[in-house]
Image (cartoon, rainbow, N blue to C red):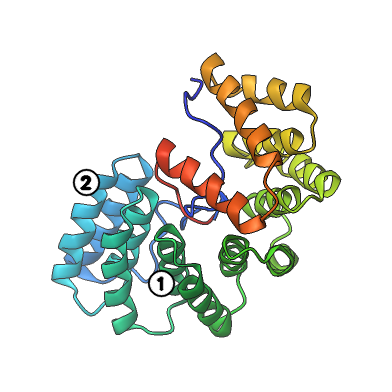
């Protein structure tokens, strides 16, 4: 089914879609023992099948049964990030890190929450702490999103590249790097990277709309419109074309990222850093 939404990038949410995805559904870390473990496994499955409200309830019940295990809180935080409930997620991450301050998954999830709350400076600290625990592509992706939000595309692009050195097939990193290039005026590099991303098996409609965005910013409106028509209804296509023109007239990188983030927030909650 075609979406009636405008192009979905990162919101701070993924700010940059930033293409910024949550931990894969059904992948909670450190499942606790006993009944709590059963609840976490059931919550993982429930989240994967698209019922975040029920999954969140199960994670909360598991936390009550096993209050010193971070796994239920991590699952809860990821679920809340996915639906844009960042204030509630903030509480889950705070509790998880009080139990395990060096849990890289919790640090990454907290960073995603902070980008969703438009607090990129604080998000940087969380992602950097995650990288201090262990190098990981998700933290570099989040770091790039935060830097893009702060109007620092050089640092953002360096972060995405570092993530790709660890995980060369990470579609979210490719997509975010391509968008960052395009927003900073490096159109050919952005288009090339996004064409690479959209050719990957894990590419989504958001990645294809990111490529349409890059074409639009480069002034290749026919290509942008053709791609958008594959994902959006007619009204949304026209809205996207107008948005590309508006974005082309802006010069400040942080303002471009903010405009894109505001657009995503109006359309739907961000899904977090991929």
Residue at 79% x, 50% y: name it.
185
At 28% from the left and 71% from the top, the residue drawn is: 32
Residue 179 showing in the rendered view: yes
Q: Nearer the viewer, residue 271 or 134?
A: 271
Disc 2 is placed on an element classified as helix
Judging by the rendered image, the residue that carries numbered circle 1 is: 106
Seen in the picture, residue 135 relative to 75 is either above or below; the reply is below
Dividing the picture into quadrants, the one containing residue 81 is: bottom left
Q: At which x and y percent is residue 219?
A: 79, 32
Q: Is residue 92 rendered to the left or right of residue 227?
A: left
Query: Which of the image's four quarters has the C terminus?
Result: bottom right
Q: Position of residue 234 (x, y in %)?
A: 56, 15
Residue that appears at 20% across and 55% down: 58
Residue shown at 42%/51% (left/top)? 25
Location of residue 114 with respect to 49 vertically, above or below? below
Residue 264 or residue 43, whichever sits in front? 264
Sequence-first tag of 2 and 1: 2
Residue 54: mark: 2
Q: Which percent across, then down, holds residue 203?
A: 64, 40
Q: Secondary structure at mark 1?
A: helix
Q: Are marks 2 and 1 in contact (CB under 8 Å)?
A: no
**Residue farthest along the top direction in this orientation:** 234
| Figure check: 36 above or below 49 | below
Instruction: Judge the density around disc 1: few (<14), some (14-19), many (≥20) Cα neighbours within 10 Å.
Output: many
Residue 250, given in percent of the width and then of the height, sits at: 67, 46
Residue 201 seen in this snapshot: no
Tell whether 60 sits left or right of 223. Answer: left
Label 2 to label 1: alpha-carbon separation: 21 Å
- In-front residue for pair 158/48: 158
* Number of the label disc, if any, that sits on residue 173: none
């Amino acid at each position: 089914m075609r979406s009636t939404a405008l192009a979905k990038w990162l919101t701070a949410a993924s700010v940059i879609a930033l293409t910024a995805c949550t931990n894969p559904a059904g992948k909670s870390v450190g499942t606790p023992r006993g009944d709590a473990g059963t609840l976490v496994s059931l919550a993982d499955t429930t989240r994967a099948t698209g019922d975040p409200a029920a999954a969140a309830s199960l994670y909360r019940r598991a936390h009550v049964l096993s209050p010193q295990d971070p796994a239920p809180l991590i699952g809860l935080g990821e679920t809340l990030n996915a639906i844009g409930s960042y204030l509630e997620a903030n509480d889950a991450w705070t509790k998880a890190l009080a139990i395990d301050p060096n849990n890289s998954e919790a640090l990454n999830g907290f960073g995603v929450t902070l980008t969703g709350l438009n607090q990129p400076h604080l998000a940087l600290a969380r992602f950097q702490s995650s990288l201090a625990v262990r190098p990981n592509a998700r933290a570099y992706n989040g770091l790039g999103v935060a830097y893009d939000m702060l109007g620092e595309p050089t640092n953002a692009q360096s972060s995405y590249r570092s993530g790709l050195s660890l995980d060369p097939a990470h579609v979210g990193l490719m997509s975010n790097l391509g968008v960052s290039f395009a927003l900073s005026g490096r159109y050919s590099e952005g288009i090339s990277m996004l064409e690479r991303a959209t050719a990957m098996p894990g590419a989504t409609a958001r990645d294809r709309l990111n490529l349409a965005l890059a074409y639009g910013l480069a002034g290749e409106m026919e290509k942008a419109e053709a791609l958008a028509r594959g994902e959006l209804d007619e009204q949304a296509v026209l809205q996207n074309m107008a948005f590309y023109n508006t974005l082309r007239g802006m010069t400040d990188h942080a303002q471009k990222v903010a405009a894109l983030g505001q657009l995503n927030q109006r359309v739907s909650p961000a899904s977090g850093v991929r």
